[in-house]
Image: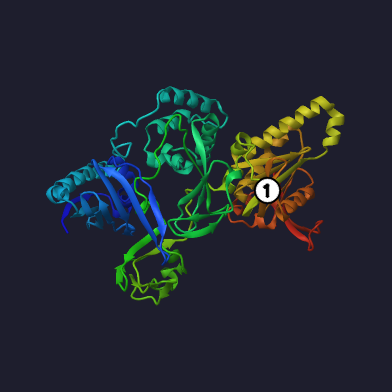
Amino acid sequence: MPRATWTWTFDLPPHELWPVLADTNRFNEAMGLPPYVLEETPQPNGTVLRRGRGKAAGFTLEWEEKPYEWIEGRYFRQSREFTKGPFRRFGPIFDLEPDGKGGSKVSYALEYEPLTLTGRLFGARLAKQAGGVVEKRILEAVAFAKGERTTWFDLAPPDLPEGARERAAALAAEVDRSPYGNRLGRPLADLVLGGMATDLDHLKPKNLALDLKVPQRAAIEACLAGTRAGLLTMKWDLLCTNCRGAKLTASALSELPRGAHCPSCNIDYDRDFEKNVELSFAPAPSVRPLGVGGFCLSGPMATPHVAVQLLLAPGEKRSIALDLPAGAYRLRTLHPGAFVDVEHDPRHGGGAFPGVRVTDKGVEALPPGQAGTIAFLNDAGFELAALIEDRTWTREALTAPEVISLQAFRDLFAEATLRPGDEAGVSQVALLFSDLQGSTALYERMGDAAAFNTVREHFALLASIVRDNDGAVVKTIGDAVMASFGDPAHAVKAALAMQTRIVDHDLVLKLGVHAGPSVVVTLNDRLDYFGSTVNMAARLQGQSVGGDIVLSRAVADDPAVQPLLTAVAACEESVPLKGFADPINFVRLQPGTSKISM
């Protein structure tokens, strides 16, 4: 098969180049290729036939999209089988290897097989032209990776609706007027107006924070403020538990179903609030409409948790040389069936990585072979892609529990609730309950108006502390506050700050903190928490005598909480609590008191 090849040497190691050069979706957009969608048809054997249509270089194309092959940090390749267009086969082969001097040798090739007379006459020229564009973009991308340029590529400005720039400027000013805008209105507007569609179709605030060099909460709050202003739209993505693609997207929490079907993996999957419900954002269509589909729907960076993906012919045996780091992995295929979870720890007697045997029922683990070598065998009777993936879910995702424990979300989208009768479980939420000691006497001493203002100021103080520690006020009950946090350490930091700052207001605060599983429900038209964790947190607050902080044992023993307690006087206690069969052990903190041993 004819091939055109280009090679370069760069002074960056392979692991730094891979995330840049293997981002095929971004490269295809930069090359001017149009977005496309795939028609995915399940086959009797469980596989999925993926067919695409589009235009490129003036040609109308129709093709079958074969799965990419790759080993993370080493190579990727893909072939499309065309039924319409100048080529029968056309696809890239990308190889990356150390050069022995701390840098990398990069090879990029285009393989093509003519289908028509045009392909036979002009195939070499077309491949050379395409490769020349790729070379230009590779050099730009490497310069970006080295910090020599501020953007990935030199691209023409996108086509925008009439008045889009003026509209975006007005909306950016509105974002900046919001208490949650964090002066990021203009950077957000600039990104919407000039950013790549690859970044904007599912804009992830945690990645945005890295790009803008701001704290994560500042970027998340700005995106929420941008949505409230009308610069952005919300996308609640229900990710496939297999490929982790956003196979169903809703504009509101109340529209999220309990499960969905992934046509790419040909499986049904359930909703898990903590793992596969992610909030992302996109430009408002009135400012920057985006095309439907992606520029590359199956490249390595589309599923960056997959370390190895091999396309195996029936009966094919293949071994690869690869040392995987310690971690939790899964062996599976791109069709429904059994999978195998692997806990790999070569540092502590874990040995070599097991091999992968594919059958029509799924995957089986083969006995480990030689260290640094992984064997693959396809006994399914048909072509299949075998995968080794990292089971750890990405930390780049902004999950639903994180969102609903942010004050900005609670304030800006108070109406965002689950639909009636719906509920969602979370494995851990840290809950803080507060109450004012002697509030009745306060009203008698100060008078109703003055006391009311004092209590209101105390609410504002506690709310600001909760926000500063990445939490949210769930509700107020009389003179009490219930707040939620994604991290127990954030709840304890907030509690310590509350007791430190409330002294200046001549008030005495009672605090209790507990963390555990809970159920998210809609109560009184607001998102709320329900279950024994809520009851325990409230009961612990009832054990507070004022000026102290009562922590459940679960919170006090949390590894991230332990360093916060080293300078705080604390003692252990045990009491029977209403609604709990056994006496409850807890830790009482006495901020401002000399340290004593627990």
Quarter assignment of residue 407: top right
Whether residue 523 is visible to the viewer of this picture, yes or no, is yes
- Residue situated in front as seen by the camera: 305 or 431: 305
Residue found 29% across the figure and 42% down from its top: 33
For residue 588, side relative to residue 83 (left or right):
right
Comparing 575 with 480, the one in front is 480
Callout 1, which amino acid?
A: Val
Q: Quadrant of residue 35?
A: top left
From the viewer's perspective, is residue 531 above or below residue 525?
below
Q: Is residue 465 left or right of residue 250?
A: right
Q: Report the quarter where the C terminus lies.
A: bottom right
> In percent of the image, x 32 and y 64: which residue is there?
311
Quadrant of the drawing holding the N terminus = bottom left
593 lies above or below 328: above
The residue that appears at 29% across and 32% down in the rendered structure is 156
In this view of the protein, which residue sits in the foreground, 263 or 274?
A: 263
Look at the image and tell me whether residue 108 can be seen.
no
Colouring convention used in this rendered image of the protein:
rainbow
Q: Is residue 268 left or right of residue 368?
A: right
Place of residue 445 in the rendered image (x, y in percent of width and height, measured from the top left) = 86, 29
Q: Position of residue 406 (x, y in %)?
A: 60, 41
Within 10 Å of the Cα at label 1, are there few (<14), some (14-19), or many (20+) other Cα atoms? many
Q: In terms of secondary structure, where does tag 1 sit? A: strand
Disc 1 designates what residue?
521
